[in-house]
């Protein structure tokens, strides 16, 4: 009998990035100054949530290899204890959420029961489609830059449940998913 492995999954969009320059690859766009500030605000929210749950930090942080996502992950790591970080080529803007969900379902149970809180730093539209892939009852959500969706995720059944969204605008409000 398979053991049930349910985790808390934080899906985060990178912060605001510098505009694309002519002949410059999208993958090398860095965060703007405002993007760095957005990520700091989102990370502070996440740190408070983890502290309120008596969690020492994140067990795993998965990020896109793109520069702006790696910079976002570095800011998260500077403010929150992260046990392990992985880069994953499947979490790029044009990545396939179903392929990544399959990867999560095979990899996370192998990590052991100590994996309870996982963050994914990626891009639009991937982050939006990933929420919908993991929780078919949820419509794709629009992520602000540095926005974070919180989900519960059952690795055995490959299903998640959208819980809420946190954004970074000065007047942002935490949005809670519909009761299901």
Image: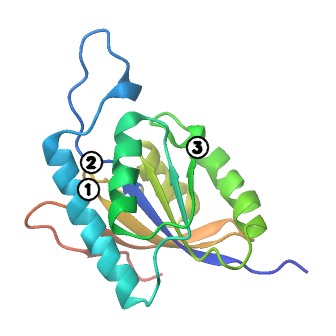
The residue identified by callout 3 is 88
Q: Nearer the viewer, residue 15 or 155?
A: 15
Helix, strand or loop for disc 1: helix
x then y, percent, for residue 152 = 53, 75
For the N terminus, the image quarter is bottom right
Q: Residue at x 14, y 43 (%)?
A: 33
x then y, percent, for residue 90 = 59, 40
Helix, strand or loop for disc 2: loop
The residues bearing labels 1 and 3 have C-alpha atoms spaced at a distance of 20 Å
Quadrant of the rendered image containing residue 113: bottom right
Q: Nearer the viewer, residue 128 or 71?
A: 71
x then y, percent, for residue 64 = 49, 42
Up-down relation of residue 64 to residue 54 (above or below) = above
Q: In the rendered structure, find residue 39 and report the number of the disc placed on it.
A: 1
For the question of whether residue 13 can be seen, the reply is no
Q: Residue at x 76, y 59 (%)?
A: 106
The residues bearing labels 2 and 3 have C-alpha atoms spaced at a distance of 18 Å
The residues bearing labels 1 and 2 have C-alpha atoms spaced at a distance of 6 Å
The residue identified by callout 2 is 15
Up-down relation of residue 125 to residue 172 (above or below) = above
């Amino acid at each position: 009998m398979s053991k049930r492995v349910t985790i808390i999954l934080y899906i985060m969009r990178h912060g605001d990035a510098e505009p694309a320059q002519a002949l410059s690859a999208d993958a090398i766009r860095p965060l703007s100054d405002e993007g760095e500030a957005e990520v700091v605000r989102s990370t502070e929210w996440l740190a408070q949530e983890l502290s309120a749950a008596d969690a020492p930090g994140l067990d795993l942080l998965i990020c896109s290899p793109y520069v702006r996502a790696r910079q976002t992950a570095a800011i998260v790591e500077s403010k929150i204890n992260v046990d392990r970080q992985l880069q994953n080529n499947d979490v790029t803007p044009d990545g396939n959420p179903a392929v990544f969900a399959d990867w999560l379902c095979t990899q996370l149970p192998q990590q052991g029961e100590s994996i309870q809180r996982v963050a994914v730093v990626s891009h639009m539209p991937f982050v939006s489609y990933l929420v919908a892939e993991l929780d078919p009852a949820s419509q794709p959500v629009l992520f602000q830059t540095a926005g974070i969706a919180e989900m519960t995720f059952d690795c055995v059944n490959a299903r998640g449940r959208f819980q809420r969204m946190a954004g970074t605008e000065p007047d942002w409000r935490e949005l809670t998913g519909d009761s299901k």
